[in-house]
Image (cartoon, helix red, strand yellow):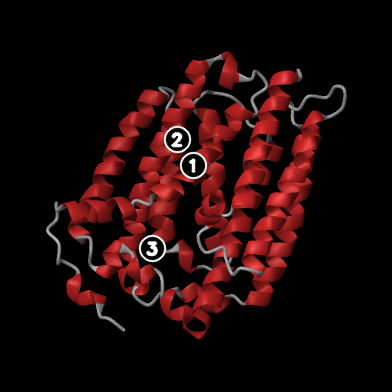
Amino acid sequence: MKDFSQSIERTTPLSIQSLRALLRTMRPRQWIKNIFVFAAIAFSEERLWYTEPIQLLRVIGAFIAFCMAASAIYLINDLVDIEKDRAHPKKRYRPLAAGLLSPTLATITAIVLIITVFPFAVWLDNDLDFALILGIYVIVQGFLYSFWLKNIVIFDILIIAAGFILRAIAGAAVIDIIITPWLIVCMGLLALFLGIGKRRHELKLLEDGAGNHRRILDEYSIPLLDQMQAIVTASIVMTYSMTAFSAPVAPKEPFPMLMITIPFVVYAIFRYLYLIYQRDGGGTPEDLVLQDRPLALSIVLWGITVLGVLIIFPS
């Protein structure tokens, strides 16, 4: 196998090629995960997303802040995992592992992003609640996870789910509203669903060499992950159904109208399972969402239906 370690510094720190590699390492495709910050305003009783546009702008600012923080975390993760990524058939082509990006430039960029994002967060929310949640996200996901928690079995998946929950809570904090507990649980379970699928994909792709890339993978097995996935799948359908029926924002007349969105959720979950088990997907959830048309269409139709119901029917 080609020795990537010989080419770590083969590009100058500020060349066009290295800047492109830096952008790749910041993972703009994965910024789609930060749409969870919009959950609170989308399901707010006051329909703030169209009654108070200024609040929507603040949530968009929160989305940008999480994109900045997430990119810093991706840089940190790749810096920590350079050698491990070189043992992975796909991740060895990441810019840092392949020597296309200087570790120095990646480190400086991560520091600048972290230093910059917090004044921006304080500007968005003077009460500091949003900045505090963002700080917890950076500490847990960027440092505790990268250096410690990702090596603790099961807890490594739970921490990934916690990151999505923090996004949702932050989206509520920045506009000072309460997010329904059922929705928080539903999003946490969805994050677990994606995390388990990703671990399963890594195990199947790497097979006997899984532990060389990520030591924690030796603690998992395909049957164990399949059992966990089955439990989480059922729980997602149940908790989303409870959200659709009982959330304060859900219109109750002429009947609980959000229940008509349940089939879209069920189809999207089943389609994702199909892609995991029949197409060996799941390694990069954002790619599946962007590339699989039936899955993407079901998510778009779900969003349109939810917004349509909330606009047309009073709560």
The circle drawn on residue 255 is none
Q: Which is more foreground, mark 3 or mark 2? A: 2
- Between discs 3 and 2, the one toward the N terminus: 2
Q: Which residue is drawn at the image coordinates 56% and 51% (left, top)? A: 289
- Viewer-nearest of labels 3 and 1? 1
Kind of residue indicated by mark 3: Phe
Quick check: marks 2 and 1 in contact, CB under 8 Å?
yes
Residue under label 1: 34
Q: Secondary structure at mark 2?
A: helix
User: Which quarter shows the N terminus?
Assistant: bottom left
> Which residue is nearer to you in this view: 85 or 260?
260
Residue placed most toward the observer, 226 or 157? 226
Q: What is the residue that sits farthest to the front in this orientation?
A: 293
Q: Kindly identify which numbered label has been placed on residue 147.
A: 3
Q: Tell me which label, 2 or 1, sits earlier in the chain.
A: 1
Q: Nearer the viewer, residue 241 or 272?
A: 272
Kind of residue indicated by mark 1: Asn
